[in-house]
Amino acid sequence: MLEWLAAFCVLILVVFICPGTKYLLGLDVSPRRLGVSRQVGCKDVRSVCAGGAEGTDEKGGTVALICKPSALAKYLQKHCRTFSRFSPSSGWTWRANAFLQSAYEACWPWETSVQFVRDNLQLNDDGLVSLDWAVSSHHRRRRTSSHSTSPVLLIIPNSFGKITRNVIKLCESALSHGYLPAVFNRRSHNGTPLTTLKLQQFGDPSDLREAVRYIRYRQPAGRLYAVSESSGSGLLLSYLGECGSSSYMTAAVCLSPVFRCQSWFENGLSWPLQWVLALYQKICLSRYRTALGDVMETDALFSSCSLRGVEEALFCQSGYSGSTSETKSGFSVPGAWDAYWERNEPLRDVDEVAIPVLSVCAKDDPIRGDAMSSLPLELFETNPHFFLLLTDRGGHCGFSTESDRSVHGASSAVGSVFSTNMSREDSNGTKWSHKVMLEFFRATTDFFNAEERAKQLAARRRGLGGASGGRSFRYRSVSTCKQVPACSHNIHAIYNWQRSYTR
């Protein structure tokens, strides 16, 4: 309890002192070092997405779509109006502060009417992961029919297993728009039992692959979409890269993703935030301390105060089952950290991704780090499957807007804001980032359907369908035989089969 109190005090100091000095000194909070207008892949995207926004703040309301020119990119620019309708909160309010809105979305409790029905999935190695299917509280049926054609939204939380307000509101938004939301929980996350002495590595998609197969078995008639938040995007990108065209997904969205994960673990966060996240991981793993002591050095794990130290103690020791070293058990070896990220870096197979992926990011994200060094802009400019929606403000999975502020009301006292205004949320509306996600899914689906219809129409015009509905054969061959009677019999049989088939 004392450790959590100390962590909260340190977080308050970081949140209030560092950003507050920028406001008091009159500095511009939103970084403008990227020069997006010169780096945008689509022609005049900045003018389309940012200039036409309604009610956009002049200082921090710019939204840029960074992508490679393609037919899908033009279709998104034309039909996704929500992309340009982002009006961030401005002025001296907690919603305009990147740290406060990020901490609010990650830690503040959220009252919801959504309930979850859990499916525990036993994997090939006897491990357990779980899928939490979101249902409304007034929903009478506990299970959805396998014949349902409703689309499924697979939600991947952050890599620490914390179910945030953003995840809960994603479930609410998905339910209100006809989706079937399912939250993927890794081994030992969110109450999932740890039945094997093996934890899921950061970018290992093997467990997620089996969960997707189960979803396809349970809902074979519905389309599958995926959305991830924060560091959970590493698992989603790894899965899409390894599976390629066999991912069974139609489109995916990453909210405030972390791309360069190795450097992020090493020096991407300030030490107070690293200490808080490392402490949260150790608290979650403390119940398995005795069992994990058989495969790793738990003293090094629970004495570490950084994200890299915890990750290295979990997966880079020679005693761990995923380690490739052959030294004495419980000791890390030189090069194990780099070898770990060679097989877990999310962008290692990015060229194999075969579906549209939208990333929604903010320049002032305090968790991801500096936008210039943490965003792989060259990926979005050269790969036609990746789209980046970049805002000047928004924090980490926050993206608070003026409409949120108008609903809650303004207050000058910070304590009053946290005690009254934060307990109420825009229950009648949907967050801007969630509207972007839903509109992106709808637009990509409509685009693919239009492309499929155009292909079918072109095939009918070329006459490939024919009167038999596309089942005629253009090439037939009959081989000669030495025994004439037998050969004649075979030809007669083939003719009868063809006549009955085309009839």
Image (cartoon, helix red, strand yellow):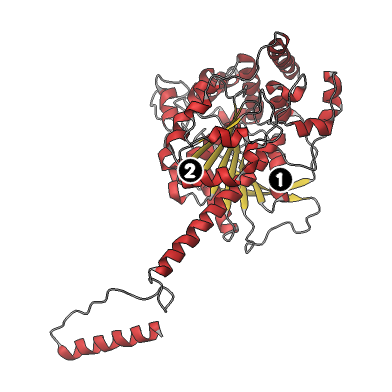
Cα separation, mark 1 vs mark 2, equals 24 Å
Q: Which mark is residue 210?
A: none
Crowdedness near tag 1: few (<14), some (14–19) or many (≥20) residues, C-alpha within 10 Å: some
- Residue 142 seen: yes
- Residue 297 seen: no
Which of 124 and 252 lies nearest the eye of the viewer? 252
Residue 503 screen position, x and y as percent? 41, 85
Residue type, mark 1 in image: Ser
Which of 325 and 485 lies nearest the eye of the viewer? 485
Judging by the rendered image, the residue that carries numbered circle 2 is 240
Circle 2 SS class: helix
Residue 440 screen position, x and y as percent? 59, 45
Which of 288 and 404 lies nearest the eye of the viewer? 404
Residue type, mark 2 in image: Leu
Q: Is residue 147 above or below residue 27?
A: below
Q: Quadrant of the N terminus?
A: top right
Circle 1 SS class: helix
Residue projecting furthest to the left: 482
Judging by the rendered image, the residue that carries numbered circle 1 is 173
Q: Residue at x 81, y 29 (%)?
A: 422
